[in-house]
Image (spheres, grey):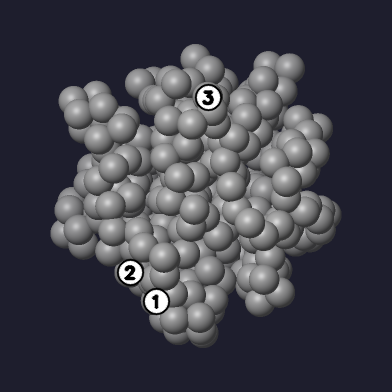
Amino acid sequence: MSPVTRSVALVGAPTDIGAGHRGSSMGPEALRVANLGARLARRGMHVVDRGNLTGPLNPWAPPTDGYRHLDEVVAWNTAVYEAVYAELKEGNLPVMLGGDHCLAIGSITAVARHCREKGTKLRVIWLDAHADFNTSQITPSGNIHGMPVACLCGYGPDALTGLGDVTPATSPDVFRQIGIRSVDEGEKRLVHEVGVDIYDMRYIDEIGMKAAMEEALADIDANTHVHVSFDVDFLDPSIAPGVGTTVRGGPNYREAQLCMEMIADTGRVGSLDIVELNPAFDKRNQTARLAVDLVESLFGKSTLMR
Ligand SMILES: [Mn+2]
């Protein structure tokens, strides 16, 4: 248990601007309805809810030059970048409530800048069914929620790769991707080429979640800032139907809990995204409630006393 009370700042980004389905714009409110703030407060954290950022409406237009809604995606990510950076600067732990996963470009660009300024090492734990390493040349859809990791590593349009103080914001070696089970053909080649460290479901099935997480968390030390980017489609759709892009064969409840608890055990979690929760596909907010449960574990709630 942390000896100091940490201030957690909830920052809502209600948009589905980068997604292939409408509805993740309702994610922030569904997480609030599932009591995210009160549950974190119960963990002994001081929680402030900053409300929602604002940005352009979703025009639901076809892609242009391999990107859908690029201008709007830039506007939303600029807002997220500024808000998350401001929270880190104040010493708060930002929790970005998406919204779709394109918003991680803004949040992680802010976290990367913060780490450079503090001289800390950045580690991003990317929990997702997808590698999110598409580019305009290889994307089948143009949806930018499939591109955030590529953009953060410098593969993307200037307006997104250069959102922060340096370009690119970060590099492939900071990422550890967990739960991956759906990667497009061109994307597969690219992640191999740049060397993203991927713990896919085949690997997790073979060695188990515990061993996989031990590897993924191995070189985290006292000078590491851990950012968790939690795409709710990481979870198996049988327990988490409330997402736009379900992929069978994800972590079950126990595996997901263990994953979160092991990240919590590092004691280094400094920022979080909760993204792709889509209430339009959910059943009685069960996926939001599950996400809140897991986030509680990420912040130190463990099943048994140790
Ligand atoms: Mn994602």
- Give the side of residue 192 with respect to residue 181, left or right: left
Amino acid type at mark 2 = Ser
Which residue is denoted by mark 3 in the rendering? 304
- CA gap, disc 3 to disc 2? 37 Å
| Disc nearest the viewer among 3 and 2 | 3
Residue drawn at x 54%, y 76% as measured from the top left: 114
Residue drawn at x 20%, y 29% as measured from the top left: 207
- CA gap, disc 2 to disc 1? 7 Å
Rendering coords of residue 287 (x, y %)? 63, 25
- Give the side of residue 174 with respect to residue 51, left or right: left
Which residue is denoted by mark 2 in the rendering? 171
Relative to 75, say whether 298 is above or below.
above
Which residue is denoted by mark 1 in the rendering? 168
Kindly indicate whether the residue at mark 1 contacts the one at mark 2 (C-beta within 8 angstroms).
Answer: yes
- How crowded is the residue under tag 1: few (<14 C-alpha within 10 Å), some, or many (20+)? many
Amino acid type at mark 1 = Pro
- How crowded is the residue under tag 2: few (<14 C-alpha within 10 Å), some, or many (20+)? some
**Quadrant of the rendered image containing residue 124:** bottom left
Relative to 276, say whether 135 is above or below.
below
Sequence-wise, the earlier of marks 3 and 1 is 1
Rendering coords of residue 288 (x, y %)? 67, 29
Rendering coords of residue 107 (x, y %)? 57, 63
| Disc nearest the viewer among 3 and 1 | 3
The front one of 216 and 282 is 216
Amino acid type at mark 3 = Leu
- Give the side of residue 141 with respect to residue 2, left or right: left
Q: Which mark is residue 66?
A: none
| Disc nearest the viewer among 2 and 1 | 2
- CA gap, disc 3 to disc 1? 42 Å
